[in-house]
């Protein structure tokens, strides 16, 4: 009787182990399918996020009135910006305090996008307040007012900062990208 019970337990144990292994294998397949579906959904979310960003940009900045303002250095070693404040038609639109990494990027020829917004077609006044270190190690603060014309369609305007030896007096000019 005891051996019959042991046999029954062995058969039941083997059967239970087989069922558990089978269920575990099926669960592994289900997990793999779930992982693949999660990755697929992540991809779909990334695409939708990009489309939403593009739609938001088009809505906030319609192409007819869109204007972008960039900053560059003309003389890479003559002027290092510390901070900048920008106003258009008396309305502050951008302020920035430069990190060492950003200063280095500008000195290597990089462009910084200062502003993206909307302006009506016509004449506008750009007010710039610049704090910078010059090539002769002086710290300067300069203010400048420059006029520009916003044309129909998208406009991109570059503020070019420069300074020349021996006095390293900062200059600010505008370049309209057409």
Image (tube, rainbow, N blue to C red):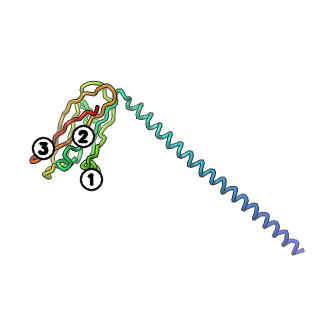
Q: Residue at x 32, y 32 (%)?
A: 67
Q: Which residue is label 3 attached to?
A: 169
Q: Residue at x 35, y 26 (%)?
A: 64
On residue 85, the disc is 2
Secondary element at image label 2 = strand
Q: Residues within 10 Å of mark 3 (few under 14, many from 20)?
A: some
Q: Earlier in the sequence, mark 2 or mark 3?
A: 2
Do labels 2 and 3 touch, CB within 8 Å? no
28 over 127 or under it: above or below = below
Q: Earlier in the sequence, mark 2 or mark 1?
A: 2
- Residue 56 in which image quadrant: top left
Estimate the x, y position of residue 62 in percent, counting from the top left: 38, 29
Q: Which residue is label 1 attached to?
A: 100
Q: Residues within 10 Å of mark 1 (few under 14, many from 20)?
A: few
Estimate the x, y position of residue 25 in percent, counting from the top left: 69, 58
Secondary element at image label 3 = loop
Of the two numbered discs 2 and 1 in the rendering, the one whose residue sits closer to the viewer: 1
Disc 2 to disc 1, C-alpha distance: 18 Å
125 over 17 or under it: above or below = above
Quarter of the image with the N terminus in it: bottom right
């Amino acid at each position: 009787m005891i051996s019959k019970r042991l046999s029954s337990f062995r058969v039941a144990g083997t059967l239970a182990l087989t069922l558990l292994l089978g269920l575990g294998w099926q669960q592994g397949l289900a997990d793999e399918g779930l992982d693949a579906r999660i990755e697929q959904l992540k991809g779909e979310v990334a695409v939708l996020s990009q489309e939403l960003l593009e739609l938001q940009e088009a809505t906030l900045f319609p192409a007819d009135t869109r204007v972008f303002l960039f900053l560059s250095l003309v003389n890479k070693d003559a002027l290092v910006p510390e901070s900048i404040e920008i106003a258009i038609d008396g309305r502050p639109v951008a302020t920035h305090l430069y990190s060492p990494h950003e200063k280095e990027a500008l000195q290597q020829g990089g462009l910084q996008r200062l502003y993206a917004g909307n302006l009506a077609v016509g004449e506008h006044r750009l007010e710039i307040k610049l704090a910078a270190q010059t090539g002769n190690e002086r710290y300067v603060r300069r203010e400048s007012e420059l006029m520009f014309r916003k044309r129909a369609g998208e406009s991109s305007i570059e503020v070019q900062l420069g300074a020349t030896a021996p006095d390293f007096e900062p200059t600010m000019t505008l370049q309209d990208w057409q």
